[in-house]
Every structure is written in C-alpha cells, then in structure tokens.
Image (spheres, rainbow, N blue to C red):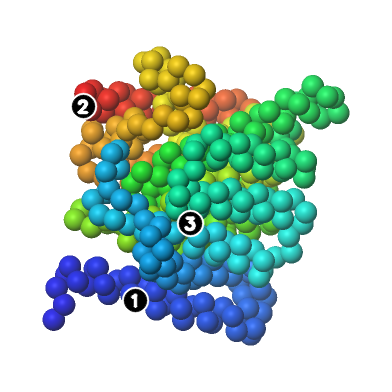
Amino acid sequence: MFSRDIWWKVSFRRIFWMLSVVLFGLLLVPAVRQLFFAVLGRWLYILLFATATSALLTPLLAALAVRAGIVDTPGGRKIHVRVTPLLGGVAIMVSFISALVANMILDERDIALVAGGTLVALVGLVDDWKNVPARYKLIVQVVVVIFLIRSGIILDLFPTKTNWGYALNAIFSILWIVGLTNAMNFIDGMDGLAAGVSAIISLFMGLVAFQTYQPFMGWIAIAMLGSCLGFLPYNLSLRKDRQAMIFLGDAGSTFFGFILAALAIKATWADNNPIVSFATPVLIFWVLIFDMAYITVERIFTGKVKSFRDWIDYVGTDHMHHRLLAVFGDRRKVVFFIFSLCATLGISAITLRNARPIDGILTVVQAFLITIIGSILEYSGRSHQK
C-alpha cells in the first residue's frame, strides 16, 4: 500500500506525465488535428499541444540537468533546501516554439519575436550553467530589443514620422521589454511563482486577443499558457513539506518576461481609445511593474544602490514575495496571494474593452489603490525582516 506521501510524490506526477504522453501522441494523429481545426478550433489545439509537450519534456530535462550539473544549490537569499535541477526553462522554450511552428504560419515580426526570446533564453541558460555577469546579460537584452525594433516591434506612443518620436518610442520599448524581462526574473523566487504569473498574464493576453480578433496574438499567448500549465505540476508545490522537482532557471524566467513583454508591444489593445490602449497592458503586467518600481525606489532611498552598476549587480531579499513571506509565514499563501492579485488586475483589464476613457482612468486608480495595500503589506514585511 502506498502512503499519501508516496502517492503525491511519485504517482501524481507520474500519472500526469503518462497522460501527457498519450495526449501528445493523439495530437500528432492527422485526423485528430483536422477534427480540432474544423470543430474545436486552432486555439484549443495549440493550448493542448503546448501543455502536453511541456509536461512530457520537463521530467526528462530534470534528469538531464542533474547529469550535466545544471542545478541550483541552497544558500544565501535562496529559500529552497535541496539541490534542484534548472532546465525547466528549456522545456518551456521547446514546447512553446513547437506549438507555434507546428500550428501556425509565422510572419516576419513573429519570427523576430521568437528568435529574440530564444537568444535571451540561451544567455540565461549559460548563466544557469556558468554564471554570466548581470551587465553582460543586460547588454544582450538591449541588443535583442533593438533587433526587434528594427523588425517593426516598437511602441506607438509618440509620432512615428518624426525622428524624435521614433527615438522616444524606441527608448520606451527598450525600457518596457528589458524591464519586464528582468522583473519576471526577479519574481522567480518561490515554487511556481514565475510560471503561474506568466500563465495568468498569458491567459488575459489571450482573452484580449479573442476580444479584439487578433488570432496571431492569441495563438502566441495560448502557446505560452499551455507551456506554463504543462510545467507547473512539477514546479508548484501544494504541500508545505514539498518543494519543486525542477526550477525554471534564468533561461525560463527571462524567456517568459521577454516574449510576453514583446508580444504586448506587437499587439493592438484598443481602437481609437488611447487610455484603454495604455491601461490594459499596464494592468495585466502591473504586479511585475510594481515589484520592479518598488525595489528600485526603495534601494535608492535607503542607499543600497548608488549607481546604475550597483543596481544591476545588487541581489537581495527585498522583493514582493520575500516581504510577503515575512508577513504570511507560508510560501503557498504568498504564491496564491500574488496569483490572486494578478488575476484581479487582469479581470479589470478585460472589462476595459468597451469602457469609456473615464472608466479606464478609474481602473488605473483602482490598481494604484491596490498597490498601496500591497505596499503596506510589504512595509510590514520589511519590519519583520529587520
């Protein structure tokens, strides 16, 4: 007889993996594929294909990571207690790209987006293996964003026909993509947190794509959602005495952040409503934006960083999840609190589609008030940490 512990540790993930293998095999059958495309739609097929591929690959890459020594060891600011493999990001990347290549025709900008995200992820993979200085990773990210800008993925905040307008759009595009790429990397500090936040962001981006009839944006978002869902059972720990079987690593978290941030720029968020167009992606990404802004301001005002070089290299336990852990005392509560916050703001973003400009302004104000609540909790956590 299996104990409950063995059932959860061995059988649940094993059954999930075997079901994923069966699903993956079925999805490769031409008749099944045609049935999905004709009756159930390409969206669901891409979602299931990405989920099955990610779930199938993750345990295999966990074993490979252990053999190759690509692991995360406990210590310092890390809160896990055992050596854990780091190739989860590779499973995410392969499943995501496979779902797109097998099921949709990519245009030039889509290819640039996927290629850019892959390059950023490969640098993250090298960092997982050999440790790359933060400034070199940042340089690569900026160069890749410039490549995206040259490929036509650029913000449209300022007049595009003027040199100054193009320059400002390019600068803000770099800040948006590089900032969110690193914000996703920063939030990857607890089991399931970055993958879950990415899944929620992908879900709401997919819903907006469905609302606005943007299938290509939707298919990319759904492929990312499926990749996250296939990975999460191996990464999210629902029991207090358990931890993740595998981590994303920098390869996974930077891939999430880069692809989703770039997709947000490529997308059209609203027709002839600049407030809704601005507020919708801001609300969907608000948790990442808030965490990055909060720690930056706090580190500067407390003197923890005194230069841009200090800011790049600084590593600390002052992120949202660290401080909420000091308040709640339970990692699971922290993770699901942040999930709930993301979902709440995402729902607000969805309701903006047919909203008046004043509704968009009020929704952003609501997000700001929620931020104040989060700030109060974080400040309390900071007091507990001292």
Q: Which residue is mark 1?
A: 15
Rendering coords of residue 228 (x, y %): 47, 58
The reply to whether dot 3 and dot 1 touch (C-beta < 8 Å) is no
Amino acid marked by disc 1: Ile
Horizontal relation, residue 346 to residue 327: left or right: right
Label 3 environment density (alpha carbons within 10 Å; few <14, some 14–19, many ≥20):
many
Mark 2 crowdedness (10 Å alpha carbons): few <14, some 14-19, many ≥20: few
Quarter of the C terminus within the rendering:
top left
| Residue at image location 64% in from the left, 83% down from the top | 30
**Which of the marked residues, 2 or 1, is nearer the chain's N terminus?**
1
Give the number of the disc on residue 30.
none
Hey, which quadrant is residue 372 in on the image? top left
Q: Amino acid at mark 2?
A: His
**What is the count of numbered marks?**
3
Which amino acid, mark 3?
Gly
Q: Which residue is mark 2?
A: 384
Whole-number angstrom distance, CA of label 2 to CA of label 1: 41 Å
Using the numbered discs, state the Cα–Cα distance from disc 2 to disc 3 in whole angstroms. Answer: 33 Å
Q: Which residue is mark 3?
A: 89
Asked if disc 2 and disc 1 are in contact, CB closer than 8 Å, the reply is: no
Q: Nearer the viewer, residue 16 or 128?
A: 128
Which of the two discs, 2 and 3, labels the residue nearer the N terminus?
3
Question: Which one is nearer the viewer's eye here, 27 or 308?
Answer: 308
Residue at screen point 30% across, 38% down = 77
Secondary structure under tag 1 reads helix
Labelled pair 2, 3 in contact (Cβ < 8 Å): no
Does residue 320 appear in the picture of this structure? yes
